[in-house]
Image (cartoon, rainbow, N blue to C red):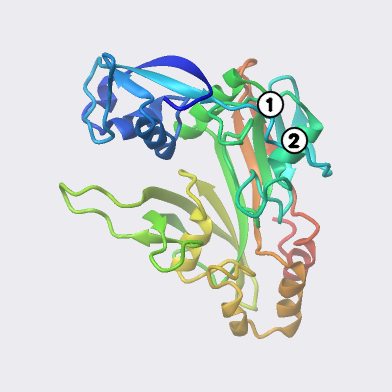
Amino acid sequence: MPEGRFRSIRFEITPELAGQRIDKALVACPEVATRSQASRLIALGLVKRLGTVVKASQPAETGEVYDLEIPVEETSGLVPYEFPLDIVYEDDQLIVVNKPSGLVVHPAYGHPHDTLVNALLHHTTDLSMGFGERRPGLVHRIDKGTSGLLVIAKNDEAQRFLAMQFQEKTTHRVYRAITIGALKPREGTIRSFLSRHPDDRKRVASVPEAAPGEEQRGKRAVTHYKVLKDHPSGLALVELRLETGRTHQIRVHLSESGVPIAGDETYGGVKRLKNVKSPRIREIIAASGRFALHAAELGFTHPTARERLSFKADWPEDLRPLVEHLGFESL
């Protein structure tokens, strides 16, 4: 077992999880939450059944009980970062923040200290440490270049309760995007399996659905969309509702549908600007320094009050010139 502090928990396999690989079944455990975290625990020998370390591919059966040792990470390696946060709501259980574009959510390569997590630690010391990985309080994320609403947990119980809602898809998440081109049909659902791009590790791409009997490569991703408004330039305002929350999900789904987000250099939203005939619009998009994707609405059930909370965040200032020029500020 690796060094450090651990929390011991037990997880029982329910009938709906039976037959799945254990690394997949453990995702239903709130303290684990993702398959990558489950795989890491198993690889470290921190998942056992009847005292024996399990294998990731081992099938789970109804009624089986697994013993897990969950690493508890200390905050000593995290440095508070003085950064003005837009706090939409805060109580003793959670914080809802309106993140600006350009702010990385948690420490990673190239951003060890200048992240939302570091800024939150400057704002408060009451954050759940959860499953380590230097992500205190986090139950979901949005891309560095995306602005909008995030909920942060202040204790472990709140983090588990909120994470379960994201896992069970009972949260309400609505994004607004400005795309180059309009989706057809104007309302529908985009489904695919997403994985790292084979030629560019910074990008994500859809991969084929696995044949019967083969293991699926990539994670299931579902995006519901509706075109709200068009502009004569060819740009469109799109509302997007997430059923799953994969890395770059909205950006990939829109790009692969032929309508990249305006300003999204990674997924074709800058290259396609040549199709926009208006020089003024091209100038405004370039001047914003970002892509036009905003997490506008967030709803969930409060961890202790058990009341439904809903929040909205208007277009940020760096997108307002584009929104106002296109007439997309009001619907």
Residue picked out by circle 1? 127
Disc 2 residue crowd, few under 14, some 14–19, many 20+, Cα 10 Å: many
* Residue type marked 1: Leu
| x 46%, y 66%: residue | 200
Residue 206, quarter of the rendered image: bottom left
Q: Give x and y (percent) for residue 291.
A: 65, 64
Left or right? Give the position of 114 relative to 271: right
* Residue type marked 2: Leu
Disc 1 residue crowd, few under 14, some 14–19, many 20+, Cα 10 Å: many
Q: At numbered mark 2, what does the secondary structure look like: helix, strand or loop?
A: helix
Q: Give x and y (percent) for residue 187.
A: 47, 57
Residue picked out by circle 2? 120
Residue 198, quarter of the rendered image: bottom left
Instruction: Name the one closer to the observer, 261 or 69.
Output: 69
Left or right? Give the position of 167 relative to 59: right
Outermost left residue: 213
Q: Is 86 situated above or below 305?
A: below
Q: CA gap, disc 2 to disc 1?
A: 8 Å
Q: Is 163 situated above or below 83?
A: above
| x 75%, y 59%: residue | 329
Check if mark 2's residue and mark 1's residue have beta carbons within 8 Å: yes
Quadrant that contains the C terminus: bottom right
| x 41%, y 36%: residue | 40
